[in-house]
C-alpha cells in the first residue's frame, strides 16, 4: 500500500513539474499579434452600427441597416451616374482669389485632399445613352461652399445646356456661400438663378438635393428646378435649425429640414435611393423626349 502511495506521489510530482515548465515556456513566448487592417470596418454616423467597408462601398456608400447615405466625392458620384467616356468642363478657370487671411491655405488643402480645383465638377456625357450636362458639388471641398468660380461654372453649364438644347442635372451639396469671398460669393446666387431661369424657358433642369444642401445654394439654383429629387435623410434648408429656433423661440420638429419632411410639405418631388438614381433619371429624361 505504501509503495502504491509513493508511486502515485512521484507521478503527481512529475505532472506538476511538467505543467510548471509549460507555464514558463508560455510566459516567455512572445505573442504574435494578428494584423487587422485599420480600414476593415467603419461605424455608421446615423445608427452607430459597424459596417464592413467593402460592403459599404458595394452599396454605393449607403448603410445596409438604416439606409443612411454617405457623402460622395464629385468623381465618385459621376462614376456612379454617368456612362463611361464623359468629359470634364471648365476645370481651369482663371480667377484671382481674395486675400482673406488663411484662405489660400484652405484652398490648397482642399485641392490636395480632393484632387479637384473647386467645389463643383461639371461634365458632359451620357446617362444610359442620353446626352446630358451634369454638375456635381463636393462637400469634401470646403463643405461645397459656393464662391465666384463655383457660380461661374454652374452659370456656364446652364448657358451651354440652353445653347445645345441638352438637359441639365445638378447634384447640390453645400454649406452655402463661401464667406472668404464676401459679397462676391453672394452675387453668384443671382447669377446662377438668372442662367437657370433662361434655361427653363427652353429646356429641362433637374436638381438632386443631397446631404447637406443649405445656405445660398438652397436659396438659389438648387430650388429652381423643373424636377427636384432628394436622397433619403438629406439635410435641406437655408439657416440652421438652432438659429431658427432661437429666432422664433420655438422648438422645431425632430425631422425638420430632412428630405422626408420636405417631401411631405411639397418642396421636393420624390426621394430616391442612390442605387435607383440612374434609372430614375433615365426615365425622367425619356419622359421629356430626350433620347
Image: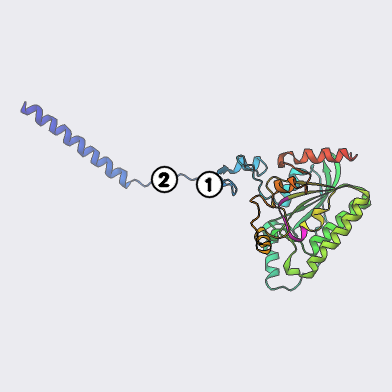
* Residue 277 is one of the magenta-drawn residues: no
Q: Nearer the viewer, residue 139 or 21?
A: 139
**Percent x, y of residue 118:** 75, 60
Helix, strand or loop for disc 2: loop
**Percent x, y of residue 60:** 68, 42
**Percent x, y of residue 77:** 73, 47
- Identify the colour scheme used: rainbow
Identify the image quadrant of the C terminus: top right
Q: Residue at x 87, y 38 (%)?
A: 287
Disc 2 from disc 1: Cα separation: 15 Å
Q: Which mark is residue 37?
A: 1
> Is residue 130 rendered to the left or right of residue 19?
right
Q: Which mark is residue 32?
A: 2
Is the residue 15 above or below the residue 269 in the image?
above
Pointer 2 local density, CA inside 10 Å: few below 14, some 14–19, many at least 20: few
Q: Residue at x 68, y 64 (%)?
A: 247
Pointer 1 local density, CA inside 10 Å: few below 14, some 14–19, many at least 20: few
**Percent x, y of residue 172:** 76, 53
Image quadrant of residue 181? bottom right
- Look at the image and give the residue range highlighted in magenta: 210-217
Is the residue 280 above or below the residue 158 in the image?
above
Q: Nearer the viewer, residue 72 or 2?
A: 72
Q: Residue at x 66, y 40 (%)?
A: 59
* Residue 214 is one of the magenta-drawn residues: yes
Amino acid at each position: 500500500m505504501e509503495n502504491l502511495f509513493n508511486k502515485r506521489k512521484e507521478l503527481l510530482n512529475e505532472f506538476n513539474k511538467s505543467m510548471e515548465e509549460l507555464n514558463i515556456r508560455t510566459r516567455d513566448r512572445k505573442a504574435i499579434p494578428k494584423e487587422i487592417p485599420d480600414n476593415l470596418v467603419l461605424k455608421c454616423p446615423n445608427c452607430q452600427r459597424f459596417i464592413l467597408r467593402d460592403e459599404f462601398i458595394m452599396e454605393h456608400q449607403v448603410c445596409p441597416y438604416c439606409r443612411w447615405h454617405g457623402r460622395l466625392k464629385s468623381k465618385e458620384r459621376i462614376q456612379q451616374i454617368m456612362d463611361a467616356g464623359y468629359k470634364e468642363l471648365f476645370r481651369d478657370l482663371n480667377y484671382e482669389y481674395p486675400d482673406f487671411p488663411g484662405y489660400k491655405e484652405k484652398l490648397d488643402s482642399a485641392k490636395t485632399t480632393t484632387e479637384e480645383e473647386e467645389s463643383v465638377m461639371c461634365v458632359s456625357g451620357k446617362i444610359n445613352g442620353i446626352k446630358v450636362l451634369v454638375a456635381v458639388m463636393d462637400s469634401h471641398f470646403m463643405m461645397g461652399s459656393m464662391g465666384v468660380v463655383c457660380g461661374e461654372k454652374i452659370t456656364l453649364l446652364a448657358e451651354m445646356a440652353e445653347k445645345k438644347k441638352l438637359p441639365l442635372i445638378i447634384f447640390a451639396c453645400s454649406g452655402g456661400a463661401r464667406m472668404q469671398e464676401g459679397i462676391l460669393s453672394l452675387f453668384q446666387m443671382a447669377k446662377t438663378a438668372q442662367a437657370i431661369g433662361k434655361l427653363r424657358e427652353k429646356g429641362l433642369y433637374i436638381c438632386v438635393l443631397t446631404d447637406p444642401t443649405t445656405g445660398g445654394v438652397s436659396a438659389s439654383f438648387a430650388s429652381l428646378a423643373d424636377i427636384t429629387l432628394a436622397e433619403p435623410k438629406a439635410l435641406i434648408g437655408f439657416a440652421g435649425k438652432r438659429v431658427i429656433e432661437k429666432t422664433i423661440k420655438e422648438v422645431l420638429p425632430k425631422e425638420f429640414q430632412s428630405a422626408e419632411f420636405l417631401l411631405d410639405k411639397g418642396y421636393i418631388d420624390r426621394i430616391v435611393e442612390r442605387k435607383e438614381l440612374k434609372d430614375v433619371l433615365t426615365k425622367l429624361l425619356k419622359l421629356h423626349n430626350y433620347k
